[in-house]
Image (cartoon, rainbow, N blue to C red):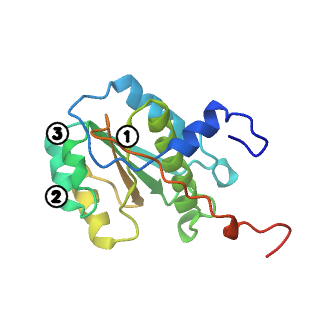
Amino acid sequence: MTGKGEPMNETLQTIMNRKSVRSYRADPIPKENLELIVKAGMAAPTAVDKRPWEFVVITDKALLKKLADALPYAKMAEKAGAAILVAGDLDRQHGGRAADYWMVDCAAAAENILLAVESLRLGAVWTAVYPEKERIEAVRELLNVPSGIVPLAFIPIGAPGGDHKPKDKWNPNQLHWNGW
């Protein structure tokens, strides 16, 4: 419900229902859905519309297993139907290599991906690659990511296995009006 008692619209429902899903059924994810999910990622805002993101969609089960083994918080990837790596191109970001806009731009894309997954009634979880050097190098090696491209987030995706509920994260103490 909104503040005035009306039901939430579909977009707000998707946002409020988004949850981290860490267990999956073995169902495959159609290529069309994966492309739609990445398209949603590419709809995110970016600084000066530079779009410094790159995406790698992983559907190969052996590769998902290797990534699950290499990334300490992505063990669920072994059972996922797919995963998406969100990475940033340092040369294409606003401000060039010395800037940090790629992280913000790619984080917005990753959130759009998570919302698209939720809207398709699938499950996903954001697992961090950046800023951990060991994780970055493992992903770079397994996926042949070129230098100048930095892996930010690895997102396993699948048909949810089990009952997953969204968390109510609303905290009015963290809301400030017209200043602190």
* 63 left or right, relative to 82: left
* 101 left or right, relative to 81: right
Residue 16 found in image quarter? top right
**Residue farthest front in this picture:** 5
Earlier sequence position, callout 3 versus callout 2: 3
* 62 left or right, relative to 96: left
Callout in the foreground (1, 2)? 1
At x 30%, y 49%, the residue is 22
Callout in the foreground (3, 1)? 1
151 w.r.t. 40: above or below: below
Q: Which residue is identified by label 2? A: 69
Q: Which residue is identified by label 1? A: 123
How dense is the environment of label 3, judged by Cα within 10 Å: few (below 14), some, or many (20 and up)?
some
Earlier sequence position, callout 1 versus callout 2: 2
Kindly report the distance in space between the C-alpha atoms of the residues bearing marks 1 and 2: 20 Å
Which quadrant: the C terminus?
A: bottom right
Q: Is residue 23 or residue 104 the one in the foreground?
A: 23
Q: Is residue 102 or residue 18 the one in the foreground?
A: 18
Say what amino acid the circle numbered 2 marks.
Asp
At x 51%, y 42%, the residue is 17
The percent coordinates of residue 86 (x first, y second) are 42, 50
At x 67%, y 69%, the residue is 174
Which quadrant: the N terminus?
A: top right
Kindly report the distance in space between the C-alpha atoms of the residues bearing marks 3 and 2: 12 Å
In the picture, the disc for residue 61 is 3
The percent coordinates of residue 85 (x first, y second) are 36, 49
Kindly report the distance in space between the C-alpha atoms of the residues bearing marks 3 and 1: 17 Å
The percent coordinates of residue 126 (x first, y second) are 40, 54
| Secondary structure at numbered mark 1 | strand
Say what amino acid the circle numbered 3 marks.
Lys
Residue 7 found in image quarter? top right
